[in-house]
Image: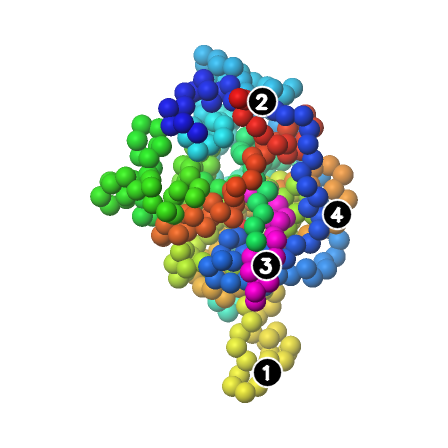
Amino acid sequence: MSKKRTIDAFFGAAIPKPPKKPRDVNTVSPETSLGNAHLDGLKTASNAKEPEVALSQDAKSVPTEAFTKQNVPGSIKTEEAIPRNSDDFSMHPAYPFPIPHLPPALAAELPSWPASLGRVINDQPDLDLLYFEPYVARGLGGSGGSARALFEFLRAELPFYRVEYDINRGGTSTHIRTPRWTTVFGLDDTSRFGGSGNEKILDAKNGCDVSADKFYTRYKPRSIPKCLDDLRRSAQEATGCEFNFCLVNYYASGADSISFHSDDERFLGPLPAIASFSLGARRDFLLKHKPTPPPMGGEHTEAMKNATSKPLKLPLASGDMILMRGPTQANWLHSIPKRTGKNAADGGRINITFRRALIKAGTDNYYNYNVGTGPVYKWDRVNREMQLWKKDL
Ligand SMILES: O=C(O)CCC(=O)C(=O)O
Ligand SMILES: [Fe+2]
């Protein structure tokens, strides 16, 4: 995409295409951790059968706020099309389309988050969690409150991808289809965005242009749009941690999942803190201790394993935030298992994680496994599904 791309080109770009179903995602794939497969080797996968649960049915469409400033042609031609002003969007040459700022009602509420105090969960070996139930207010009377509004907004406005890649296991190549929608924004600590439209990547220390670095050229890093950056800043204040990356997962139904893994890539440093937000349908978040080496010459019995740590199941609800910190990633695995719920209404769930990548290799890794080289998808408010997005030629 041209760096000189004008705002008009941006706003004229988004033309929804006729409905096209994404590929079938129900097949269980030997999916790995979020992108460290190539760096750190395969992580534990779990297809363990879990009891059936119904997914939340609190789906009520929350209308996007009307924009009242000077209007430009709206790019989203759906029944909810709203003319918007260019000032109300984040733009970046590497975005497929502009991303709106938070609707005013959500932006006004943001300073009051977290909506509750965090609860420490550290009663097991090597586990350190801070659990906000909720962080984003859920509202009263089944409306879903701000958490539902934020879910609807992000699902409709972010570009999503269905990433596929190959891994090599003992000389055998396996094709992986990521069983959920993903997207990512951010840049590691060594660099910052610069230039008039954030189109350059500059060395964080000396300001030199490092856009041509090999870790920044396979995929073009994109700045965190204001709507997610507002949440990042809030999470930083609430936790005292720093974050430079924002990863988003969209689980369209109980068929979408993430298998057991830990976010312990070397590029995150030794004790990474990860703030993980849940919006939309309730889903179980499972945690289990990594296998510990058996005593010299012996074997671990089940009793020995259970004596030290117990698996955890946290039914994460809309608006919840869980901070995983300290030794957690080094010692525990986590997952969102598949669920075969009734799912009659909207079983969709968005997960947002804020992380801090220390080196350039982290940037390349995150874009590789969360954006990839495939097409862009955007939520279609009329057909209520992700649709292939193509820019207007
Ligand atoms: O969806 C979730 O709650 C977990 C996501 C996750 O573990 C990850 O993105 O690494
Ligand atoms: Fe994770």
Looking at marks 4 and 3 on the same chain, the residue that comes earlier in the sequence is marked by 3
* Residue 256 placement, left or right of 166: right
Q: Nearer the viewer, mark 1 or mark 3?
A: 3
Label 2 to label 3, Cα distance in Å? 37 Å
* Residue 190 placement, left or right of 98: left
Check whether the beta carbons of the residues at disc 2 and disc 3 lie within 8 A of each other: no
Q: Residues within 10 Å of mark 2 (few under 14, many from 20)?
A: some
The quadrant in which residue 384 appears is top right
Residue 150 position in % (x across, y down): 55, 34
Label 4 to label 2, Cα distance in Å? 34 Å
- For disc 2, the marked residue is 15
Callout 1 amino acid: Glu
Q: Is mark 2 within 8 Å of ligand 1?
A: no
**From the viewer's perspective, is residue 150 above or below residue 180?**
above
| The one of 180 and 286 positioned closer to us in this rendering | 180
**Which quarter shows the N terminus?**
top left
Q: Examine the residues drawn in magenta and state their main secondary structure.
A: strand
Callout 4 amino acid: Gly
| Element type where label 1 sits in the image | loop
**From the viewer's perspective, is residue 39 above or below residue 68?**
below
